[in-house]
């Protein structure tokens, strides 16, 4: 999972980056709230971990802004030294998914991260071989998609990209998120590579309102799969 961490203390940022990386996640660290907000506007994160006291915008204000502005808003964990019960209640009532009081052990922090991811459906506990989305049926063993009764073969990368989109309808994915997740941020990878894969998926799967789905390009950001309810 792709996780953003914002804390004005370098030691905390380094600690969290190492912890999350060891836990199998990809971490982007920010030293102040404004940098994080700019990143959240242009990029995609599966989870955000916020310190409360940061210049020039504190974590609680960022949390409220994110809940009001971002659609969808990623889950948010407050990681702070503020231990007063009133602070905990205020953060949770403002939309935080969890509240961790510093200092805390690595195992507990990682466990709380995994728990939030499970609750917010970013980390399925079980995956079946065949997954159905409307008229589309995905076979994870053969990298094929069946539309009605027609089998559509895809490359492994095309299948992974299509499945990511179908598992997250209406969620906007930034280009950086897709490249980092599916291509592992290969250096010097031409941006045209992702465009070609999107074009092939759109064509091969015949994504359009007539089949219940449309693959939308979000200018300056990335892509989103939209679902149409057909009566």
Image: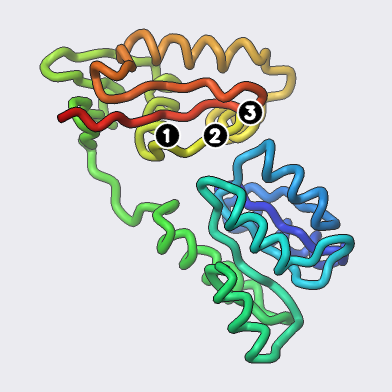
Residue 74 locus on image (x, y percent): 55, 53
Q: Residue at x 39, y 30 (%)?
A: 226
Tell me: 163 left or right of 180.
left
* Total labels drawn: 3
Which of marks 2 and 1 precedes in the sequence? 1
Residue 60 locus on image (x, y percent): 71, 69
- Numbered disc 1: secondary structure: helix
Mark 3 neighbour class, 10 Å CA radius: few under 14, some 14 to 19, many 20 or more: some
Q: Residue placed farthest to the bottom in the image?
A: 85
Q: Are marks 1 and 2 in contact (CB under 8 Å)?
A: yes
Q: Are marks 2 and 3 in contact (CB under 8 Å)?
A: no
- 79 in relation to 41, above or below: below
Residue where numbered disc 1 is placed: 164
Q: Are marks 1 and 3 in contact (CB under 8 Å)?
A: no
Tell me: 31 left or right of 83.
right
Q: In terms of depth relative to the viewer, which is nearer, 158 or 212?
A: 212
- 181 in relation to 28, above or below: above
Which of marks 3 and 1 precedes in the sequence? 1
Question: Considering the image in quadrants, where does the C terminus appear?
Answer: top left
State how far apart marks 2 and 3 are (Cα). Answer: 8 Å
State how far apart marks 1 and 2 are (Cα). Answer: 10 Å
Q: In terms of depth relative to the viewer, which is nearer, 53 or 109?
A: 53
- 108 in relation to 226, above or below: below
Residue where numbered disc 3 is placed: 221
Residue where numbered disc 2 is placed: 173
State how far apart marks 1 and 3 are (Cα). Answer: 17 Å
Residue 185 falls in which quadrant of the image? top right
- Numbered disc 2: secondary structure: strand
Mark 1 neighbour class, 10 Å CA radius: few under 14, some 14 to 19, many 20 or more: some
Residue 4 locus on image (x, y percent): 68, 52
Label annotation for residue 211: none
Q: Residue at x 34, y 15 (%)?
A: 154
């Amino acid at each position: 999972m792709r996780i953003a961490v914002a804390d004005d203390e370098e030691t905390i940022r380094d600690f969290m980056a190492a912890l999350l990386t060891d836990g199998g996640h990809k971490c982007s660290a920010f030293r102040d709230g404004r940098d994080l907000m700019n990143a959240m506007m242009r990029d995609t994160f599966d989870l955000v971990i916020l310190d409360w006291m940061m210049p020039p915008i504190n974590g609680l204000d960022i949390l409220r802004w994110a809940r009001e502005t971002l659609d969808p808003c990623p889950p948010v964990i407050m990681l702070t030294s503020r231990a007063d019960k009133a602070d905990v209640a205020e953060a949770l009532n403002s939309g935080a998914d969890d509240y961790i009081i510093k200092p805390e052990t690595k195992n507990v922090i990682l466990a709380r991260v995994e728990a939030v991811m499970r609750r917010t459906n970013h980390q399925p506990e079980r995956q079946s071989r065949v997954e159905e989305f409307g008229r589309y049926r995905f076979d994870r063993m053969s990298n094929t998609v069946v539309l009605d009764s027609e089998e559509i073969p895809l490359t492994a990368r095309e299948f992974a990209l299509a499945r990511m989109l179908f598992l997250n309808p209406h969620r906007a994915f930034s280009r950086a998120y897709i490249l980092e997740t599916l291509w592992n941020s290969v250096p010097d990878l031409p941006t045209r590579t992702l465009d070609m894969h999107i074009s092939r998926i759109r064509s091969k799967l015949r994504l359009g309102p007539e089949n219940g789905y449309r693959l939308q390009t979000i200018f300056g950001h990335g892509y989103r799969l939209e679902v149409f309810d057909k009566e």
